Amino acid sequence: MARSRTSVRNQIRTLRFHHGEMTQQQLADQIGVTRQTVNAIEGGKYSPSLEVAFRISHVFDKPLEEVFQFAGASG
C-alpha cells in the first residue's frame, strides 16, 4: 500500500532559501538527522518528531507554528 502525504505542511524550503540558501544537508547537520530525512519532511512524506520539529524551528529562529501547520482532514 502506498503511503500518503501527511496532514502537516511546512515552510522549510522557503525558510532555507531565506536563510542564505541553506542546503538540505546543512539543515540536516544542524538538527542531527540525515539529508534524506530533511527531504522527506520538507516534501510532506514524513512528519518529524516533536523534538526534530523544535530543532528546525530553532535553526530558523521561528515559532513552531510558523514552520509547521496542521492541514487537518480534507475528506
Image (cartoon, rainbow, N blue to C red):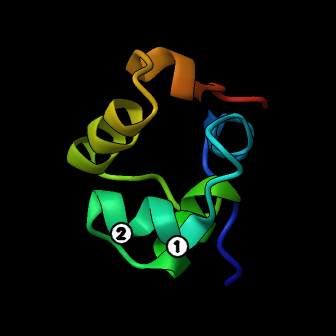
Please tell me which residue is depicted at 36% across the width and 69% down the height of the picture: 29
Q: Secondary structure at mark 2?
A: helix
Q: Which mark is residue 29?
A: 2
The outermost residue toward the left is: 51
Q: Which residue is mark 1?
A: 25
Q: Do the numbered discs 1 and 2 sit on residues whose CB atoms are within 8 Å?
A: yes
| Corner quadrant of residue 41 | bottom right
Residue at screen point 53% across, 61% down: 46
Q: Would residue 38 appear left or right of 58 to someone viewing this image?
A: right
Q: Residues within 10 Å of mark 2 (few under 14, many from 20)?
A: few
Between residues 26 and 36, which one lies in front from this camera angle? Answer: 26
Judge whether 60 appears above or below 35 on screen. Answer: above
Please name whichever residue, 13 or 18, is drawn nearer the observer in this view of the structure: 18
| Label 1 Cα crowd, 10 Å radius (few <14 / some 14-19 / many 20+) | some
Secondary structure at badge 1 equals helix
Residue at left offset 38%, top offset 39%: 59
Residue 58 image position (x, y, % from top left)? 32, 32
User: Percent position (x, y) of residue 26?
Assistant: 49, 65
Look at the image and tell me in which quarter the N terminus lies. Answer: bottom right
Name which quarter of the figure residue 18 lies in: top right
Q: Amino acid at mark 2?
A: Asp
**Residue at the spot 41% in from the left edge and 79% down from the top edge:** 34
Give the residue type at disc 1. Gln
